[in-house]
Amino acid sequence: MTSPRRAQAASRKVANRKLRRFEVEIERLARTKGRPRVVRGHAYTPAGTREWEDRVGFAFIEAHGKTLLAGPVRVEIEFNQKRGDLDNLAKAILDGLNGVAFADDSQVCALHLTRPWEPKGRAHTWIMVEEMRV
């Protein structure tokens, strides 16, 4: 059994630990999460959606390696484009980060999404994933 002193010391160590933060920018028009298709009772994700999710995962791995944060995370996503429903754009990003930045998108406890009404410059997507204190 752990002594109260050791438990307090461990708690302070976790509380004082610097939270990890990862940023990625993808130079491309983002894709929305496509509706699953069903053929002969088998559901599959459309090829364009799967390709975009793979690109998001590869961009994160290229920048930071396979991280797999264990606890709750906060995600910010900024889309510099005019098209696409914000919720469907975000879903494709979060699914692309599954198994790469975090084990599952159910770990996302805070999500901030932005898309300018009138985008300027090149189409790109900026993603930030940050650990949260427990």
Image (cartoon, rainbow, N blue to C red):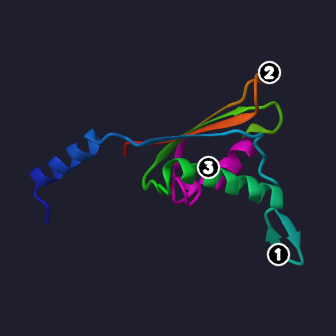
Query: What amino acid is at disc 3?
Result: Ala
Task: Name the residue at 13% across, 66% down.
Answer: 1
Label 2 sits on a secondary structure element that is loop
Which numbered marker is on residue 64? none
Dot 3 falls on a residue whose secondary structure is: helix
Residue highlighted by disc 2? 118
Image point (43%, 56%), residue name: 70
The quarter holding residue 2 reads bottom left
**C-beta proximity under 8 Å, tags 2 and 1:** no
Question: Are the residues flagged by discs 3 and 1 in contact, CB closer than 8 Å?
Answer: no
Q: Name the residue under label 1.
A: 42
Question: Could you tell whether 95 is left or right of 69 in the image?
Answer: right
Sequence-first tag of 3 and 1: 1
Q: Bounds of the magenta span?
A: 87-110
| Callout in the foreground (3, 2) | 3
- Residue drawn at x 69%, y 44% as measured from the top left: 90
Residue at point 49% right, 49% down? 64
Q: Position of residue 59 (x, y in %)?
A: 61, 49
Question: Could you tell me how many numbered marks the image carries?
Answer: 3
Question: Gap in Å between the C-alphas at discs 3 and 1?
Answer: 29 Å
Q: Mark 2 or mark 1, which has the lower sequence index?
A: 1
Specify which label sits upstream in the sequence, 3 or 2.
Answer: 3
Mark 3 vs mark 1, foreground winner is: 3
Residue 117 drawn above or below residue 60: above
The disc at residue 59 is 3
Q: Is residue 106 shown in magenta?
A: yes
Q: How far apart are marks 2 and 1 (CA)?
A: 40 Å
